Amino acid sequence: MKATAHVLDERDGVYYVAGVVHAHTTMSDGRRPPEDLVAFAHARGLGVVCITDHHFDSWRYRFGVKVSRSSVQRMGMAPYLERIRQVAAADIGPLVLPGIEVMPHYRWEGIAPFLCCQAMKTGVVYGLDNASVLDAMPMQLDGRGRSEAEARVAAQTLIDYVRRAGGLFFWSHLEEDEQVRFATARIRYLPRPDLLTTSTGYTGFGCFPHGDKHACRPGGAWDERLAATLRRGATDGPWTTGESDYHWGDSARPYENISDPTTVFLLDALTPDAVLGALRSGRMYAYRGSSFRTSLMRRFEARCPASGACAGSGQVLRAGAAPQLSVDVTGFTDGCRIRVIAAGAVLAEHAGHGLDLGLPLPTGAGYACRAEVTSPSGETIMTNPIFVMPAREPNAR
């Protein structure tokens, strides 16, 4: 157990630890060396730092034109991973995990020099710390991309590879229209919230700061995918995180504030493996705002009164009778509203810091239940779902 990791709260052996899950350093296009990044995160009260520098940021045009930003390619994957291992071993404070941001595909449109590069949305990969495995990731980055359909196939091929290798893939900034200009060329990442339903096998996505307006609305793409997960008999997400995509500075603007948004992990141990386990299993919630230390989701729990079974974020509740849901938040000093979403529909809304209500009796494949807490100032907590499923028959395996 790493005693210097920040613990926001502890309840029944579960440690609440806030972290940055998407951050860049001088190993790609960030402005802080990794050691400084971790020390800075520690000073801001973060107990987890996932370093996710750009794997590849070079857009080649067929006539030899190339637009580039700094990426890990310049130093090599093995030295990159070794540098992160050294930082993690230095015991600066937070738990440090390696990750990488990947771009599956791009294609050019227009006529040189007035070109537009349409890039597939990027993803963040965790849980792979073997340089040869990362070097072999299948991506179509040769400048010969031709279509959106081709881009989606390339993205799915990459997700499948990461999953087979034991890694985790999280979509990033699905709803942002990202544009970067280099002289007369333009790089554009179009909004693609539909990737939540048209791609499969990914572990999750970032809901904050650019993924909650459409995908997370009741009955939106996230709820559609959660329902599809249950229909195939699985309970493996997808999960959501709060990703700052930190590069530099620390203002209130996205990408410049390392602690807004954050991901708050529910850990059974203060170890990197426990963090990876939480990312894999949904034992976390996303927070947007400036008070992650005090505005906490202290309880999000469904319980079956008949059996005494209970479950929280990312877990399964088998219920033979109508279960009860308890929600308890602290902080939110200007007030808050709790909204409970079950089976893709708003089940209840409540003004206040606590809520107890009955949930529907699960039928068929069951349903996903999640909660959203908002304040007038824009503070928001987005939980990961509890899967409420029918009780197994006595002889069912």
Image (tube, rainbow, N blue to C red):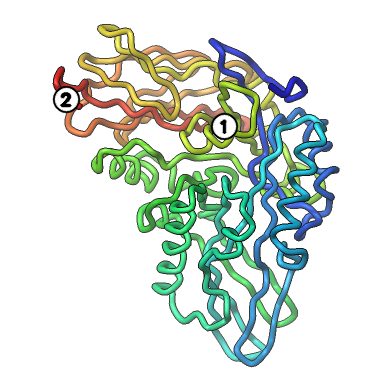
> Which percent across, then down, holds residue 13?
56, 13
What residue does disc 2 label? 396
> Which percent across, then down, holds residue 151?
45, 71
**Towards the viewer: 382 or 150:** 150
Q: Quadrant of residue 308?
A: top left
Q: Is residue 174 above or below residue 95?
A: below
> Which percent across, then down, holds residue 59?
64, 76
For the N terminus, the quadrant is top right
What residue does disc 1 label? 380
Residue at 59% across, 33% down:
273
Three-letter amino acid code at disc 1?
A: Thr
**Towards the viewer: 172 or 37:** 37
Q: Which mark is residue 340?
A: none
Three-letter amino acid code at disc 2?
A: Ala
Q: Which callout, 1 or 2, points at the residue further toward the start of the chain?
A: 1
Q: Secondary structure at mark 2?
A: loop
Label 2 Cα neighbours within 10 Å, binned few <14 / some 14-19 / many ≥20: few
> Which percent across, then down, holds residue 347?
33, 26
Q: Quadrant of residue 287?
A: top right
Residue at 67% across, 89% down:
64
**Disc 1 + disc 2, Cβ < 8 Å:** no
Residue at 64% across, 86% down:
114
